[in-house]
Structure formats: C-alpha cells, structure tokens
Image (spheres, rainbow, N blue to C red):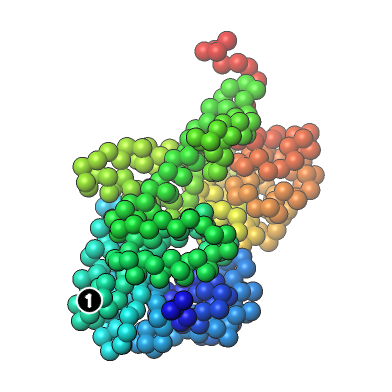
C-alpha cells in the first residue's frame, strides 16, 4: 500500500478516535487542530475527550501519533488527509460548510508546494452537492488538478458516541464517494486494512454517497419513532407490552430488530439534525420529505408523553423528582439534544424540584440553577418522591430495589427488576399497560 503516513484535521470526538485507530494499525499519524491545549494533551498521551477505550488506545500507540496546529507540517509529512471538522446546522435545516471550506483552503495552500499525489478524504457529514463545490476550491488554492495531482473522497462514518472505536474498526459497511478511480481505490485499501470485519465497501460518485449518508440516519430515526408510537399505544391498552411486540416483528427480515426499542425519543449531535437535513434536502429538490418531518415531530412529543403521566397520576409541585441519566445515551458525556435533559428541564419549569445524577457527569462539569446534581444514583433517589430512569446506563440496573421503596418510579427503558420494585413502589414501565380496564372502544 502506497500510504503509510496520514494526517487527520479536527481532533474532536470522531477525529481523535479515527487518528488513534489509524495509529493502532501501524500508520504514522499527525493530528491537526486549532485548540493548542488539546494539541498539548494529545502529545502528552492524554485524551481531551470522553470516549470509552480512547485513552487506552492513545497511551498504547502514542509513539505513532503527534498533533500540531501547523497545516503545512501535517500535509507535507503525510500521503493522505482525513478532514473531520464540524458542519453545524443552518436555519434552513442544512449543514454549514464554513469549517470544511476553511480546512480545505488551508490543505490546498499546503499542497501548492508539495510534490506528488495526495489523497484528501472528507469524513464530516455534508449536504448533497457539497463535494462538487469543494473540488474547485482545492484546485484554486493548490494550483493543482483533482484526479491528477490529488484525489478527493467523501467517506462519512456511521458510528455512535460511546462506541466510536469499535464502530471504526467493525463497521457494517464502508461508504466512499470518489472523484476518480485512483482516489477511491486508495481509500478502499486504507479501510480494508483498518477494518477488522471485512465489511462491504460501497464506492460511488459524490452525490450518491452524500444522499446515502443522510438517508441512513433518517431511516433509523423513523424506526425509533415508530417503536415509540407502539410503546405509547401499549401504555393505553390493557395487557400490552411493547417489548414482546417489537421482539416479534423485529424477527421479520423486512423490519429487523435494530433501533426498534420503544422508550424515550432519540437525541445527540447527529440523529435530530440529520433527519431535518434530509427533509430540507428533499424540499429543496422538489421532492416530499414528509416521513422525515413526521418522524421529527413524533420525537419532539416524547417529553410531553412523560409529563402527561404526571397529570394523569396527580403528581404535582412541590413534589421532588429525581432524573437518573442526563446524557442522550449511555457511554458518553454528551447531553446535546438529550431527551432526558429536556424532560428534567421541562419538569423544573413546571415547578417541580429536580434532582439529577449521571455516571458521566459531575457537579463541576454540569452546573445549572434549575437542576440539583447528586453524587450517586442512590442519593438522587433518596432525595425524591418520584424517580425517572431516563438514560439506560448499565449501572442503574444494579441499584438495590429497596432504595425505590415508597417512590413513584417511571422506568423509561424497562431496565429495573420490575418484580422487586413493583412490590415496594408504584412502578410504571413505559411501553407496558398503565390501564387496569379495557378501553371502551375495545370493550
């Protein structure tokens, strides 16, 4: 393989993991970032971000990984560059190319004085049509020709925070949009060498890869909202259990069991915005994005679904409410678009006194006037009248059931020992029947 030295522009939650995975596979890697303190930490073998397995990987392979703020140093000492910078959402619902254009411009300028062929790979999620705009920008800044002097590829990852390292090493498939045959072939060789599960590699033109990327998350979120709709139905039908239903229908190969879990809505830095972007793109080309829009609307109603339980069960201020979990999913410290955090803040706005706990957060890292952070899950539960298990952290399954005695417990993910808790508390697992009588329409 021609490429042995790789630079990675952007050392965020994905970029730093990618740099370390590449280093772990024997590549010499130079990371580039504008944050000098982050660069210093990486060069000292300290991870500046929270991601399971990353710190161990960084310490084990730090000899092959360095970091700098100097684009020229990174580009001149590498054969390929992966760009992993933010693409924040715009008011229209699409993604901004601002940071990508800045990075590509600097890469192009560095390439101007560099001899030989260089591969440039964009990993950041972009709107369809973006890659065709970036090729001329690189040509202008470098005075070189795409497809002859350098190659350009789009190679978005399908990973989840809390599982990034494994996702990079064992993806379901690899998606490549390529400017030319050579660029696509070189990137495919890198991915084949890095991936441990011999995944299928789908190579195509730019626009097909761009549409494929946002299509995946839009489809996944549609499954999530469908499962949550089933869960809400089950809560209102005597004897109904969403887990039994989704387990059964998930065995149909046309449906599949992945992401078919009725609970709280989805959140995080990708799912909500990618779904909106899909709908925005569809509208922009004169197509219908109704499925994506309805999926988003259903997701936004999930917090109200929980607060309706409070109204129905006559739970009202000044009762104290404990929320276990604030991150949008287990295994990460990210609270962006977290339904658990939205729920806690909504209840606080209604006058409830809210206590919170999350294994990935601390009182120092998460300060807010409206929410009172507790040092342990048990302390959070003991301080409250109502307890909501909002994020399915594994540690919550191990809480002694006696702590929940005489509490009103809402288990959004049905992870607690319901038999033990049911005997000592008022236990409400989402997705299971709350009704004791058959609804009149079914009687």
Where is 443 relative to 286, above or below? above
Where is 119 relative to 216, above or below? below
Taking depth in this image into account, of 290 and 150 the one nearest to the observer is 150
Q: Residue at x 62, y 68 (%)?
A: 53
In the image, 115: left or right of 228?
left
Q: Residue at x 40, y 77 (%)?
A: 80
Residue 415: percent from left, percent from top = 68, 43
Residue 111: percent from left, percent from top = 29, 83
Report the number of discs: 1
Taking depth in this image into account, of 386 and 411 the one nearest to the observer is 411
Label 1 CA crowd tier, 10 Å (few <14, some 14–19, many 20+): some
Taking depth in this image into account, of 257 and 411 the one nearest to the observer is 257
Residue 299: percent from left, percent from top = 45, 41
Q: Residue at x 37, y 84 (%)?
A: 75
Q: Secondary structure at mark 1?
A: loop
* Residue of label 1: 145
For the C terminus, the image quarter is top right
């Amino acid at each position: 393989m021609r490429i042995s030295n790789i630079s990675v522009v952007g050392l965020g939650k994905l970029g730093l993991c990618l740099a370390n995975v590449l280093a772990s596979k024997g590549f010499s890697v130079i990371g580039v970032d504008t944050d000098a303190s982050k660069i210093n930490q990486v060069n000292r073998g300290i991870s500046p971000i929270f991601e399971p397995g990353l710190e161990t990987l960084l310490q084990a392979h730090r000899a092959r990984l360095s970091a700098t703020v100097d684009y020229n140093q990174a580009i001149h000492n590498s054969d390929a560059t992966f760009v992993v910078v933010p693409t924040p959402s715009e008011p229209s619902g699409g993604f901004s190319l601002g940071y990508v254009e800045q990075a590509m411009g600097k890469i192009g300028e560095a390439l101007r004085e560099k001899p030989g062929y260089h591969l440039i790979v964009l990993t950041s999620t972009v709107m369809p049509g973006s890659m065709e705009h970036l090729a001329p920008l690189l040509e202008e800044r470098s005075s070189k020709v795409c497809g002859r002097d350098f190659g350009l590829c789009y190679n978005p990852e399908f990973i989840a925070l809390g599982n990034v390292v494994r996702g990079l090493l064992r993806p379901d498939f690899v998606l490549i949009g390529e400017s030319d045959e050579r660029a696509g072939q070189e990137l495919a060789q890198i991915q084949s060498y890095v991936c441990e599960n011999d995944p299928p590699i789908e190579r195509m033109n730019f626009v097909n890869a761009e549409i494929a990327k946002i299509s995946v998350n839009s489809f996944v979120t549609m499954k999530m909202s469908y499962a949550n709709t089933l869960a809400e139905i089950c809560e209102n039908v005597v004897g109904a259990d969403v887990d039994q239903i989704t387990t059964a229908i998930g065995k149909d190969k046309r449906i599949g069991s992945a992401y078919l879990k009725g609970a709280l809505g989805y959140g995080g830095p990708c799912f909500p915005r990618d779904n909106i972007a899909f709908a925005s793109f569809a509208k922009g080309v004169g197509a219908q994005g109704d499925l994506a829009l309805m999926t988003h609307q259903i997701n936004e109603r999930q917090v109200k679904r929980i607060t309706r339980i409070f109204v129905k069960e006559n739970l009202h201020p000044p009762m104290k409410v404990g929320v276990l979990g604030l991150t949008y999913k287990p295994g990460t410290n990210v609270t962006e678009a977290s339904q658990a955090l939205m729920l806690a803040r909504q209840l606080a706005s209604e006058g409830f006194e809210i206590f919170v706990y999350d294994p990935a957060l601390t009182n120092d890292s998460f300060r807010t006037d409206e929410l009172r952070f507790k040092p342990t899950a048990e302390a959070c539960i003991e301080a409250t009248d109502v307890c909501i298990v909002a994020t399915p952290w594994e540690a919550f399954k191990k809480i002694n059931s006696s702590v929940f005695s005489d509490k009103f417990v809402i288990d959004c993910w049905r992870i607690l020992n319901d038999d033990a808790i049911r005997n000592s508390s008022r236990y409400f697992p989402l997705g299971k029947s709350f009704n004791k009588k058959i609804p009149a329409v079914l009687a």
